[in-house]
């Protein structure tokens, strides 16, 4: 038989109330519900944006459409956010195609030359494969 008097004492009750307080304070029940009902990709896109902030949604779509994580990708986020290379990293990449990602580029007219990862890139030597809002994917012409 379980002795309930051993479990129900002041210290245990206080710990239970403190635990429930913190769960309520940080919306633990609601957050658990959201995690179970939303997919990983939708949670990442809500947190990191489609074509804003880190541009997770655009990067993820380019990985799915063009398999850019199989090739060398040079990218720049013009709002200064970190890049999502690590989430889509493949150790062995093929150097025969080269892609350029411009994320959060807010100028309405793209000049002939832009700076990507600290080096000047002539956009006349690239083909625009895809663009949505202020995010662009270019591929080096063959």
Image (cartoon, rainbow, N blue to C red):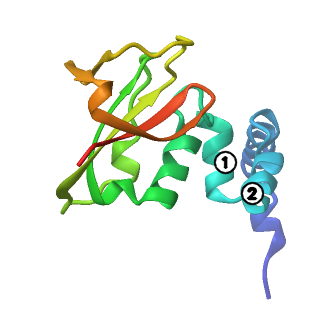
Instruction: Left or right? Give the position of 79 relative to 19.
Output: left
In the picture, the quarter occupied by the N terminus is bottom right
Residue 3, position in %: x, y? 79, 76
Q: Which residue is mark 1?
A: 43
Dot 2 and dot 1 residues touching (CB under 8 Å): yes
Residues 57 and 71: in front is 71
Q: Quadrant of residue 89?
A: bottom left
- Residue at 74% x, 38% y: name it: 22
Circle 2: is it few (<14), some (14-19), or many (20+) Cα within 10 Å? few
Residue 109, position in %: x, y? 51, 13
Residues 53 and 133: in front is 133
Residue 104, position in %: x, y? 52, 22
Residue 5: image tag: none
- Residue at 34% x, 55% y: name it: 69
- Residue at 63% x, 28% y: name it: 133
Residue 62, position in %: x, y? 49, 50
């Amino acid at each position: 038989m379980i002795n309930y008097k051993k479990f129900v004492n002041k210290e245990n009750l206080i710990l239970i109330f403190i635990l429930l307080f913190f769960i309520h304070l940080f919306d633990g029940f609601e957050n658990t519900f959201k995690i179970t009902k939303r997919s990983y990709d939708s949670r990442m896109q809500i947190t990191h944006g489609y074509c804003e902030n880190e541009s997770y949604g655009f990067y993820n779509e380019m990985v799915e459409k063009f398999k850019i994580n199989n090739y060398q990708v040079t990218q720049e986020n013009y709002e200064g956010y970190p890049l999502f290379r690590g989430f889509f990293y493949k150790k062995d990449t093929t150097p025969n195609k080269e892609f350029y990602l411009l994320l959060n580029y807010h100028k309405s007219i793209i000049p002939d030359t832009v700076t990507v990862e600290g080096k000047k890139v002539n956009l006349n030597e690239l083909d625009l494969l895809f663009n949505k809002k202020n995010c662009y994917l270019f591929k080096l012409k063959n």
